[in-house]
Image (cartoon, coloured by chain):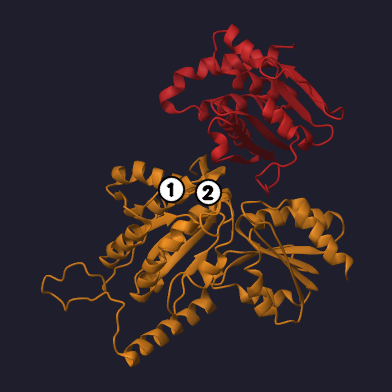
Chain colours: A red, B orange
Amino acid sequence: MSMNLLLAGFGGQGILFTGKVVAYAGMLDGKEISWLPSYGPEMRGGTANCSVCVSDSSIGSPLVTEPDVLIAMNLPSLEKFENAVVPNGLIIVDSSIVDEKVKRKDVRSIYLPATRLASDNGLKGMANMVMAGRLYKETKFCSESAFNEGIKKSIPARKQDLMEKNITAVKIGMENSD
Amino acid sequence: MPEKVLMKGNEALAEAAIMAGCRYFFGYPITPQTEVAMHMSKRMPKVGGVYLQAESEVAAINMVLGASAAGARAMTSSSSPGISLKSEGLSYIAGSDVPAVIANVQRAGPGLGGIQPSQADYFQATRAAGHGDFKMLVLAPSTVQEIIDLVADAFALGDEYRMPVMILSDGLLGQMMEPVVIDETKKINIPERPWAISGHENKRKHNVVNSLYIEPPDLEAILKARYEKYELIKKKEQRCEEYMTDDAEIVVVAYGASARISRSAVDAARKDGIKAGLIRLITLWPYPDDAIISRMATAKAFLCVEMSMGQMVDDVRLIVGGKRDVRFFGRTGGMIPTPAEVLREIKNIKGGF
């Protein structure tokens, strides 16, 4: 089993956090993992992206240049990375932010209005976790208990009260079939 | 068994230093190294240590010299342009026979260059960290766990040989997170420093830590003695990890981040039936000459993969002495080679056999 995941969006959408959840979940499931953020000027107001590798074997390059799965939370990210996705790969788009459709025909595309679903359910700012829920449903990259534990581990001690909201957001992402 | 946690390479570097008994950190912020200083600023006060943000890199390295000369385990960290500024102090540390740990989380150069990962400071680290005849031990981790392990070794080696030790990291290793195990039960062994200028209370002759020797014969004798120590280190401290090299016709040589990428390329080459292997350098000085020499038995060609225009490749060429083909593949300026690119180079070489 191996999954090379690229998460991309605006700074502030929780891209790096979502990547951390996936990384922790993979680790707790006994897999090899790596997490690598983009750093530098692109983070200031522009695009933020994060490479996460989850694998049964040791990880070479932590930089994901050919993702199996792309999570695109804004248009520049979709435009920038759509062509990098491997054939038969998966692209999950936050369709409440991105109006465009995926142009490629050799990948599976999912349009999830994550930002709207989050705010409709009183979970403003948690679109990233709605996306994470859908990612889990589609890939099952680890056990469900490891995934939940991964969320818990990723939330700093002083913010543990947000655990429940995060879980709710994940459930919405899993259950929505838009 | 302590539990696994996720840590950034830079945080791990700082935490490992604290675990190794380092209680004095003198730094100055620079991307992509700043998390080292951030972590130190949070943790040092909690363990009774000193975190000091100096007014410049030059000041920070000289504070390391002072603290270490007084007997403390001290370190500093920076990234490429900042390391250039530290070179004067590094030379003084070497010339004073004082241990110190210096971390370079490399970014692209020259000049301010760029902030993305690079390995273009190999020459600086192994050849010319400062003026004068001297060497520095240079350790090159390639995983976050190995950063932790090598930082502990760096402090121990520095004390053993009374010399500066550099951890040569890069922006990729510094910024990435991987699972690590931090074993807090590990015993720290900090040897006595009878030479330290720590106050003699009239109970012994006063110590002197100095790098100035006006009389040429005196300085020559000291340098010759120091180089005897370097020869001993060359014999005792060469370290590398070999992967699939037993029957390898094409031996990839790499360190740090590019070794991880090369390993994936070697796996892919083996799947295609190409006898490829990897020598991953752990010590850059002393260079693991012996491993290269012993691999010449099966190797038809060596391929050096670096995030530079080609620096470490010179060492392989020196060792091989024209007896084998030595090739180079690199990306630079903050670009990171991909396993596919390295595989293509391996196949090119194979095609020429």
Q: Residue at x 53, y 70 (%)?
A: B126
Q: CA distance from mark 2 to mark 1?
A: 9 Å
Instruction: Inspect the image, locate mark 2, and give the three-letter code of the amino acid beneath it.
Output: Gly
Residue extending farthest to the bottom is B217
Asked which quadrant contains residue B218, the reply is: bottom left
Quadrant of the image containing the N terminus of chain A: top right
Q: Is residue B346 visible?
A: yes
Q: Depth check: B165 or B2 in front? A: B165
Q: Would residue A18 be found to the left or right of residue B59 on screen? A: right
On the image, the x and y values in percent for residue A121 come to: 58, 7
Q: Residue at x 46, y 51 (%)?
A: B13
Give the answer, above or below, for where B195 lies relative to A29. below
Q: Would residue B350 be found to the left or right of residue B167 on screen? A: right
Chain on which label 2 sits: B
Q: Which mark is residue B174?
A: 2
User: For the residue carrying disc 2, how many other residues have a C-alpha within 10 Å: few (<14), some (14-19), or many (20+)?
Assistant: many
Q: Would residue B72 be found to the left or right of residue B19 on screen? A: left
Confirm or deny contact between disc 2 and disc 1 (CB under 8 A).
yes
Instruction: Inspect the image, locate mark 1, and give the three-letter code of the amino acid beneath it.
Output: Val
Secondary-structure class at tag 2: helix
Q: Depth check: B59 or B267 in front? A: B59
User: For the residue carrying disc 1, how many other residues have a C-alpha within 10 Å: few (<14), some (14-19), or many (20+)?
Assistant: many
Chain on which label 1 sits: B
Identify residue for label 1: B36
Which is nearer the N-term, disc 2 or disc 1?
1
Give the answer, above or below, for where A9 lies relative to A130. below
Asked which quadrant contains residue A63, the reply is: top right
